[in-house]
């Protein structure tokens, strides 16, 4: 009998031939070369660190706490782990890059910074995988992007210091280097500001346990001392501890203080800085009032004293701007500054806050709405409404962090909605997250050089518990980590999925709540195959236009044979806003008079973001396209509901016609449909 060597078997199976071994590391390093043999760690194996004192202390403390205690340097040993800073590494430009060489006697990590040594250490720890054995190899590695982030919203549903520290541990293992904390929003102010104790004595507390109950109950605030008060905040000492803990893991914490909108909690605490002085709180601050800038700048002073990050995030998204149009102070500000509209008034606030931050040696970052009315000169744009805002910012020479909702919003369902806890909407499985390329070559290097990186965002309106929050983060943040680190040409879903399973298992063993990828149900069954029917490929005339935000395949959408999945943002569901009560009104030309027995379409409902079933559907037919006869009128009582659901509105019978008209009317929300099927 012929016995195959591992190398020969590898060749037959199409695997790497060097000992048939691969390096099981996530995120995947840029370049790996496997070698012969293994390094065996023993009780006498030493840890030698040649680095500046602060880095050396961080690295040794981390290795002791998270890996193992090594013998002191200098003690006689047959093996060693060495971390060494060097002036330069050929072929590696990023200060976060490193080179790792493992032989049977030594594991050597070289880098130009402490961060690079830390990431090399993370790779070593993954290679050891809880054992005493590290495979011999050479790795030359550096991140694709300098900004690799996660955003955690602790305003809508408060998460405490210990939860945040736990997530920092996971981020560090995956070489993520930014933690963006969404500290303030209408649902609660979550950071102690000593000059304004009212913000945490009142605006951090509510009578209801969850954001949804609070929102449905009138969005009221109560005093911390009131019976049943729910909420909380980070003390300044808590925040400093988070910042230090993160820094010891080479993670920068970026604070976000929302302005000019999402500020109900701020204007409830200080009604004088809203346009209406409503004690309940208004979403937008008054930009015409100098008191507004006094409070914002005083708040930012304390924020900057706690958080040493270059970036201070100021939000800037979803300002209604309605009150500004009627406010005497805002109108006076516009006249005095020569501002033509409320978009420019928002830009005035952004510019002024940026100047203040710049004067303190800091930089402003905000959501892509900060571009409206003119982008502040030095601002960085965080692109969430698709990729267009980030690309536009990059083309104008501004740094952009890409975080489009269709790929990076982790509050969406990650599997079939009926199998999952409540989410805000959408369907964002791990594979779709992983498919995202923040800086495709097609943009050209003159644009991609301004794309700083990528970030995953967890908004928590519908995420009330710590376990639920972890479940939404993991494993999708593993994909964000690899997108941010690994060269695009190295990334393969087939390679990533088993590694994501392994990381998930490791995290579960450490006490994290992680979505079970092995039990994934997948996309809506109807979306997995094309459907053939009489109207497929036939012309559709839109008597009411579709919603330009959700074009799908434009004129081809409703007869292209493609059904939608769990998300209305998947490019197959076409959206319709109202014109009066009308939503959908289309006519399909079958090209000749045809026998028909069925006409129907599916609609989606998820009322949280305003997507509703129709109130009435009418199906009509015609031979000439002018004179129509009713086949069916289907009445439906519209009801608010939780979660995602689908409903078919159809007619069955016997008829003959060339033209089929399908109308849907509604008194609530917008409509989404994917295909009008005729048989």
Image (tube, helix red, strand yellow):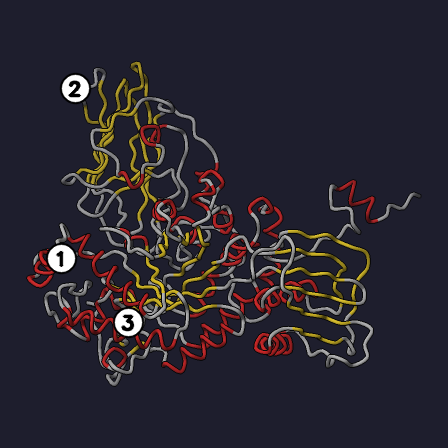
Query: On the rendered image, what quadrant is the C terminus found in?
Result: top left
The CA distance from mark 2 to mark 3 is: 57 Å
Q: Nearer the viewer, mark 1 or mark 3?
A: 1
* Image mark for residue 337: 1
Assess disc 1: are there few (<14), some (14-19) or many (≥20) residues with their C-alpha within 10 Å of its C-alpha: few
Q: Residue at label 2?
A: 627
Task: Determine the residue positioned at 22% across, 37% down.
Answer: 664
Q: Position of residue 661 (x, y in %)?
A: 24, 27
Q: Residue furthest right?
A: 1
Q: Work out whether mark 2 precedes mark 3 in sequence or the reverse, and give the earlier one.
A: 3
Examine the image and state in which quarter residue 318 appears: bottom left
The CA distance from mark 2 to mark 1 is: 58 Å
In-front residue for pair 159/331:
331
Query: On the rendered image, what quadrant is the N terminus found in?
Result: top right
* Image mark for residue 188: 3
Q: Work out whether mark 1 precedes mark 3 in sequence or the reverse, and give the earlier one.
A: 3
Residue 500: tell me if it is visible: no
Image: 318 above or below 255: above
Residue 121: tell me if it is visible: yes
Task: Determine the residue positioned at 19% across, 56% down.
Answer: 320
Judging from the image, what secondary structure is the residue with disc 3 in?
Answer: strand
Q: Nearer the viewer, mark 2 or mark 3?
A: 3
In-front residue for pair 27/415:
27
* Image mark for residue 181: none
Task: Determine the residue positioned at 13% across, 64% down.
Answer: 288
Image: 199 above or below 627: below
Judging from the image, what secondary structure is the residue with disc 2 in?
Answer: loop
Q: Are marks 2 and 3 in contact (CB under 8 Å)?
A: no
Q: Residue furthest bottom?
A: 225
């Amino acid at each position: 009998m012929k016995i195959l060597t591992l190398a020969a078997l590898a060749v037959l199976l199409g695997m790497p031939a060097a000992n048939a071994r691969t390096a099981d590391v996530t995120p995947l390093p840029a370049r790996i070369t496997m070698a012969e043999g293994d390094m065996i760690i023993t009780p006498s194996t030493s840890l030698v660190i040649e680095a500046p004192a602060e880095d050396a202390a961080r690295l040794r403390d981390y290795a002791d706490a998270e890996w193992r205690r090594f013998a002191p340097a200098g003690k006689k040993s047959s093996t060693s782990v060495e971390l060494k800073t060097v002036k330069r590494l050929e072929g590696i430009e990023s200060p976060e890059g490193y080179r790792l060489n493992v032989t049977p006697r030594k594991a050597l990590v070289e880098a130009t910074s402490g961060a690079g040594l830390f990431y090399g250490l993370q790779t070593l720890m993954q290679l050891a995988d809880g054992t005493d054995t590290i495979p011999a190899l050479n790795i030359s590695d550096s991140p694709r992007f300098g900004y690799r982030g996660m955003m955690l919203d602790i305003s809508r549903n408060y998460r405490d210091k210990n939860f945040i520290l736990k997530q920092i541990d996971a981020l560090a293992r995956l070489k993520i280097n930014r933690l963006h904390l969404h500290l303030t929003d209408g649902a609660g102010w979550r950071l102690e500001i000593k000059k304004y104790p009212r913000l945490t004595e009142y605006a951090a507390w509510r009578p209801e346990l969850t954001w949804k109950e609070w929102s449905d109950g009138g969005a009221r605030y109560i005093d911390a001392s009131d019976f049943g008060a729910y909420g909380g905040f980070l003390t300044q000492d808590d925040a400093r501890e988070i910042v230090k803990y993160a820094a010891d893991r080479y993670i920068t914490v970026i604070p976000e203080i929302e302005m000019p909108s999402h500020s109900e909690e701020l204007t409830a605490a200080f009604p004088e800085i809203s346009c209406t002085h409503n004690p309940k709180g208004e979403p937008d601050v008054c930009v015409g009032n100098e008191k507004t800038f006094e409070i914002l700048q005083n708040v930012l002073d304390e924020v900057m004293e706690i958080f040493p990050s270059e970036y201070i995030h100021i939000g800037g998204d979803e300002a209604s701007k309605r009150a500004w149009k009627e406010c005497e102070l805002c109108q006076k500000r516009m006249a005095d500054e020569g501002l033509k509209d409320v978009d420019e008034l928002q830009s005035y606030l952004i510019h002024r806050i940026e100047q203040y931050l710049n004067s303190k040696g800091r930089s402003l970052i905000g959501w892509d709405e900060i571009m409206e009315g003119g982008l502040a000169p030095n601002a960085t744009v965080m692109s969430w409404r698709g990729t267009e805002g980030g690309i536009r910012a990059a083309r104008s020479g501004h740094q952009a962090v890409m975080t489009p909702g269709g790929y990076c919003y982790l509050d969406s369902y990650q599997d079939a909605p009926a199998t999952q806890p409540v989410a805000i909407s959408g369907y964002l499985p791990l594979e779709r997250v992983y498919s995202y390329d923040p800086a495709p070559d097609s943009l050209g290097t003159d644009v991609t050089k301004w794309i700083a990186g990528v970030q995953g965002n967890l908004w928590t309106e519908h995420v009330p518990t710590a376990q639920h929050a972890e479940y939404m983060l993991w494993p999708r943040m593993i994909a964000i980590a690899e997108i941010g680190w690994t060269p695009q040409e190295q990334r393969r879903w087939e390679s990533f999925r088993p590694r994501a399973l392994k990381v998930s298992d490791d995290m579960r063993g450490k006490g994290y709540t992680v979505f079970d990828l092995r039990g994934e149900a997948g996309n809506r069954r109807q979306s997995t195959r094309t459907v053939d029917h009489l109207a497929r490929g036939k012309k559709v005339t839109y008597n009411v236009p579709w919603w330009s935000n959700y074009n799908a395949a434009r004129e081809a959408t409703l007869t292209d044979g493609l059904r939608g999945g769990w998300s209305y943002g998947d490019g197959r569901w076409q959206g319709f806003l109202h014109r009066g009560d009308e939503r959908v009104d289309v006519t399909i030309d079958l090209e000749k008079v045809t026998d028909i027995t069925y006409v129907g379409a599916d609609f989606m409902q998820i009322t949280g973001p305003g997507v509703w079933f129709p109130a009435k559907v009418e199906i009509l037919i015609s031979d000439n396209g002018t004179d129509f006869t009713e086949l069916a009128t289907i009445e439906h009582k519209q009801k608010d509901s939780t979660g995602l659901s689908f409903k078919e509105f159809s007619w069955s019978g016997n008829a003959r016609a060339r033209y089929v008209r399908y109308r849907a009317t509604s008194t609530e929300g917008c409509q989404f449909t994917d295909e009008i099927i005729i048989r």
